Amino acid sequence: MLVVMKKNALPEEIEAVVSAVEQKGFMARPIPGGERVAVCILHNSGAVDASLFLQLPAVKEVIPVTRPFKLVSRESRANDTVVEVGGVPIGNGHLTIMAGPCAIESEEGALEIARIVKERGAQIFRGGAYKPRTSPYAFQGLGEQGLKILARVHSETGMPVVTEAIDHEVFDLVEQYADIVQIGARNMQNFSLLRRAGKSNRAVLLKRGMAATIDEWLMAAEYIMEGGNNRVILCERGVRTFAHHSRNTLDLSAVSVVKQESHLPVIVDPSHAAGFRDQVVPLARAAVAVGCHGLIVEVHNHPERALSDGAQSLYPDQFSDLCRQAEAVSELLHPLREKAAA
Ligand code: PEP
Ligand code: MN
């Protein structure tokens, strides 16, 4: 249930609603909207008597939240959320490009790729220090050393960085270095990790599990928001199907459904969906056309020598093409925004 405050409600009037909710033994979570604040009631097991709140000062209305994911739902926040990371906005009409290698392999290599992707259009640098690998014999990432290299990339290029926390054990360390902590597809329903992310002051990139429904994905985001972290970015990265022509099947319809169901930004990872670099640029174009708020793409200066995911990593010139084409499609969708910004 959502207690919607009047436009000019005072902080103490909002606080009075929070106290009234807490006195009933429930949790209250104020959600700032574009124009007004709404207080979302959580952890109520049945219907809540609306009259309790309607009589309080500055309460406009009380409306039910029909979806199981409450804080994530558009019902609790009509306007798109924009997650800002180091001055870079993600969401609501922006097209944010995150790029870099699958894994951080060396300082020299990471810095070179970072300079390349920045020059060609990326705003955020990606790179795994801890890698979730199918085989225990495969390169597992440089760990803390990789995080230190990410810090160097950040200070040299000014780009915020996104990197994965593969388990609870490494979360504290990853959080110290990452501007955005990634929760990978394999961990989308690792509930203790989601709860830890909910306590983080970092933005979280939540990838869709490879066999997760949209409801399961949004409920995973709800775990993070329920913990108090509202800076959640969703990422569609393809789901497992019978297809062999690609690593996964990019579910573009998920983007438009999520945009209807949730106010959170949703970006697309065409690299892990495709598995092969030649499919990445066309899928990126389609993702922008369907309305995603950004892309996360693997790029390598020498993909043939990459220690992971070389086959899907773009050559620098392909990444330039991707940025140009993504921007062109975005301009078609948002001509007014482009003119206004000019
Ligand atoms: C990654 O981004 O490097 C990654 C492992 O992605 P996913 O969790 O989507 O497989
Ligand atoms: Mn990868």
Image (cartoon, rainbow, N blue to C red):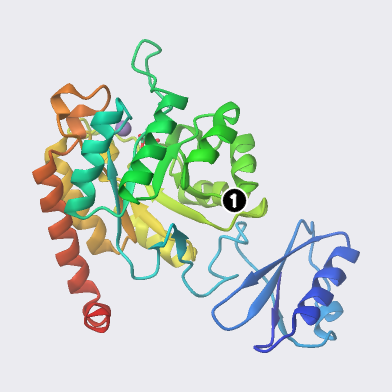
Where is residue 288 drawn, in percent x and y? 25, 60
| View quadrant of ligand 1 | top left
User: Which amino acid, mark 1?
Assistant: Asn
Q: Answer yes or no: is residue 25 visible.
A: yes
The residue under the point 48% across, 61% down is 264
327 to the left or right of 192:
left
The residue under the point 79% across, 81% down is 13
Looking at the image, which residue sits at the far right?
23
Graded by Cα atoms within 10 Å as few (under 14), some (14 to 19) or many (20 or more), the crowding at tag 1 reads some
For disc 1, the marked residue is 201
> From the viewer's perspective, is residue 89 above or below residue 126?
below
**Frontmost residue, 288 versus 10:** 10
Quadrant where the image shows the C terminus: bottom left
189 to the left or right of 258:
right
Where is residue 216 drawn, in percent x and y? 53, 46
Quadrant where the image shows the N terminus: bottom right
Q: Is mark 1 within 8 Å of ligand 1?
A: no
Circle 1 sits in a helix, a strand or a loop, which is it?
A: loop
> From the viewer's perspective, is residue 68 above or below residue 315?
below
> From the viewer's perspective, is residue 74 above or below residue 212?
below
